[in-house]
């Protein structure tokens, strides 16, 4: 199983409210015919997201925040490629065309991942905090992934101490 994450930024002429409304009311409907997607989740940025203020005050990030992150699960990369092939899959073309009406691809990024669950919530979680990391220049991808997986011990310890539910 692979998972697509696509941290997105809206086109500059759209407000966050307009972007989110188009994404859920128009684009999500265009994704309904897709049959090889095992699960599709839209993570909508909160209009009053407190992390924006915290990061700005701390001077931690100078990047504009993402406006939303869709996540889709597929059995394989081949399934994803078949599903989104506009020449072979007739229902893909309208979704691809709509994508350009609200998503600024020049300021968005997508990546495929394999999951390494560290702490799973014991029930529905109303909010999800997502941090998008970029490896530093000079750090190869394999070393970055090993170091990031090593950070899992911190989360496990925090969970065991009751700091994360």
Image: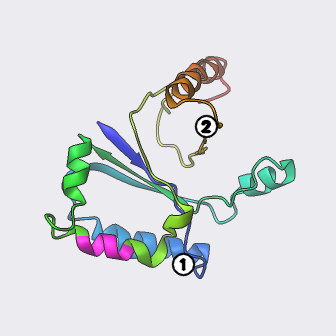
Q: Is residue 94 magenta?
A: yes
Residue at screen point 70% across, 57% down: 63
Residue at screen point 68% across, 26% down: 163
Q: Nearer the viewer, mark 1 or mark 2?
A: 2
Say which residue label 2 marks. 135
Return the residue found at the far front. 138
Residue at screen point 75% across, 50% down: 61
* Label 1 neighbour load within 10 Å: few <14, some 14-19, many 20+: few
Q: Position of residue 101 (x, y in %)?
A: 43, 78
Q: Is residue 137 magenta?
A: no
Can you say whether 47 is above or below 63 in the image?
A: below
Task: Give the structural element (helix, strand or loop) at label 2.
Answer: loop
| For residue 22, side relative to residue 65 (left or right) | left
Task: Give the structural element (helix, strand or loop) at label 1.
Answer: helix
Magenta segment: 93-98
Can you say whether 94 is above or below 42 in the image?
A: below
């Amino acid at each position: 199983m692979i998972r697509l994450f696509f941290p997105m930024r809206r086109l500059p002429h759209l407000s966050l409210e307009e972007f989110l409304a188009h994404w859920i009311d128009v684009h999500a409907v265009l994704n309904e015919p897709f049959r090889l997607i095992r699960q599709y989740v839209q993570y909508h940025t909160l209009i009053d997201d407190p992390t924006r203020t915290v990061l700005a005050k701390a001077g931690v990030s100078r990047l504009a925040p993402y406006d939303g992150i869709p996540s889709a699960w597929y059995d394989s990369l081949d399934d994803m490629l078949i599903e989104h092939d506009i020449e072979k899959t007739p229902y893909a073309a309208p979704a691809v065309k709509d994508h350009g009406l609200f998503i600024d691809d020049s300021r968005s990024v997508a990546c495929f991942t394999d999951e390494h669950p560290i702490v799973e919530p014991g029930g529905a979680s109303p909010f999800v905090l997502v941090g998008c990391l970029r490896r530093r220049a000079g750090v190869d991808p394999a070393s970055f992934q090993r170091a990031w997986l090593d950070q899992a011990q911190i989360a496990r310890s925090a969970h065991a101490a009751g700091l994360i539910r």
